[in-house]
Image (cartoon, rainbow, N blue to C red):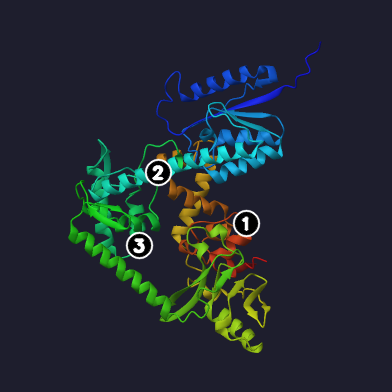
Amino acid sequence: MANDTKVLRCAIYTRKSTEHGLEQEFNSLDAQREACEAYIKSQAFQGWKALPQQYNDPAYSGGNLDRPALKRLLAEVVVGKIDVIVVYKIDRLTRSLADFAKLVEAFEARSVSFVAVTQQFNTTTSMGRLTLNVLLSFAQFERELSAERVRDKVAASRRKGKWTGGTVPLGYGTKDKKLVIDKSEAETVRTIFKLYLDLGSFSKLVAELDRRKIVTKRRNTKVAKYRGGIPFTYGPLAHLLKNRIYVGETHHGGKWFTGEHDAILDQSTFDRVQELLKSNTVKRRLKFSQSGALLQGKLFDDNGNRMGPSFSSKNGVRYRFYVSTAMRGRPHKAGTVSRISAPEVENLVKAAAEERGIPIDQIVKVTVSAACIRVDAGNIKRKQRTIDIPWSPKPKGVATITRAPDHADEKLVKSLVRAHAWLADLTAGRYACVEDLAAAANINPKVVRQGLRLAFLPPELTMSVLNGKATMALKDIPKTLPLPWAVQRAMIGYSSIECYGTSGPLMVISLDPG
């Protein structure tokens, strides 16, 4: 008589919260799987059969569903490859009531059963579901209680000045779970603080640190982006200069406590740096508040980046602008217009608003693109009020370039030639990567990457530079450039560039990104 029992495909899921014991030949995951396999064999008369695939999540918390093996298991459920999910205990699957509700809903939608071999219940009845919820409530309570105990222990240790782990700052190492001074790095920290007091600004400090090849702390980690050893930027530099750990204190819950570790800086030096930081911050705020920026906080480019007020001075004349915040470190994310004259956009918006009887302070948002300026005046009489002002960036004449055309920028010429030589070396395979080339030239890889951008400038500008007739300086070219030439020309900040030959202008290249 043929056996008509339907085969039920059983997937075994195992999880362990920590790495402790995983190195053992027979660890917790193996024990869980062995127990589940034994249970499946006991149900063989009902057609249960264990799948060979293993769904193991070692060192993953049960507090969320962000686990690789669990995601793979759920994907198999969706495509109908699993009939029964078997776990050792219910908290191996999840410790969250909310997550469990989602899982049960997903299982029921695919007619997938769920079994915990050490906790007998039936999810098809109301009593079985109540039992599950009670068990999960205790599992979640246990997880939250453990987390509270850890937080309390960390807080108590920090109040006593102990190091409880985390990112080790530049200037220190760890020994016996305590911070100890790294002499060479400590000297680097003192140098950075002294240079900031001498130079008085972040921009000058960053340039000087690059010149001295001073970089962030190098770390031994498997993840490349966390290894450090890269040039300082404004954010990490500001964090370092404000870090009270250098005067022998530890931080917790917004408060600082006397630490067990030795200080790298004296209190006087640290206090003077904090005063200078505060003074520079106040000055920047005053500049912005005195700039008369009518659209401050309301102006955006067409990629959604806020455009903040800025200004430049030339021959005693002050020029106001709005500049996309993406231009500071992320120029490739800027909109089609990354910089616009403040008086121009303010006058256009004011005129359009006054013409329609809209108070200027009622304007909610202004978006600038290469085609138009869109003004959002919010809800007026329960109707959305939007004004589109036709507009395109005005071409700037050659007069906006301050250098005379018969004076070539030697730095730009040398940098351009060097960039093409570097590109040729990399293309020919003489160096495997930028890091190898930088090591051979004894310079920082960041310098090479920024220098290589010059090898991808528009050809007509490249020829004009090499001929020594370009009305362009190295400082006029942003440190980061996208590949499209039209976008490059717009980012350089000029609407037109005249390229000069031996007998006068050769051509005029329009820089309108449209």
Give the CA distance from mark 3 to mark 1: 31 Å
Query: Which of the two discs, 2 and 3, labels the residue nearer the N terminus?
Result: 2
Reading the chain from its start, which is encountered first: label 3 or label 1? 3
Question: Can you tell which quarter of the image residue 6 is in?
Answer: top right
Q: Is residue 47 visible?
A: no
The disc, 2 or 1, on the residue closer to the chain's N-terminal end is: 2
Disc 2 vs disc 3: which is toward the camera? 2
At which x and y percent is residue 363? 58, 79
Q: Residue at x 72, y 21 (%)?
A: 7
Question: Looking at the image, which residue is at 27% across and 48% down?
Answer: 156
Give the labeled residue for mark 1: 484
Q: CA distance from mark 2 to mark 3?
A: 45 Å
Q: Can you give x and y, in whole percent of width and height, for residue 356 in the image?
A: 66, 87
Report which quarter residue 165 is drawn in: top left
Q: Position of residue 251 (x, y in %)?
A: 29, 53
Specify whether residue 235 is in view: yes
* Amino acid type shown at disc 1: Pro
Task: Determine which of the numbered discs, if any, sits on residue 202 in the image.
Answer: 3
Crowd tier of the residue under label 1, counting other residues whose Cα lies within 10 Å: few below 14, some 14–19, many 20 or above: few
Task: State the separation of the CA atoms marked 2 and 1.
Answer: 55 Å
Q: Residues within 10 Å of mark 2 (few under 14, many from 20)?
A: few
Residue 24 appears left or right of 351: left
Q: Amino acid at mark 3?
A: Phe
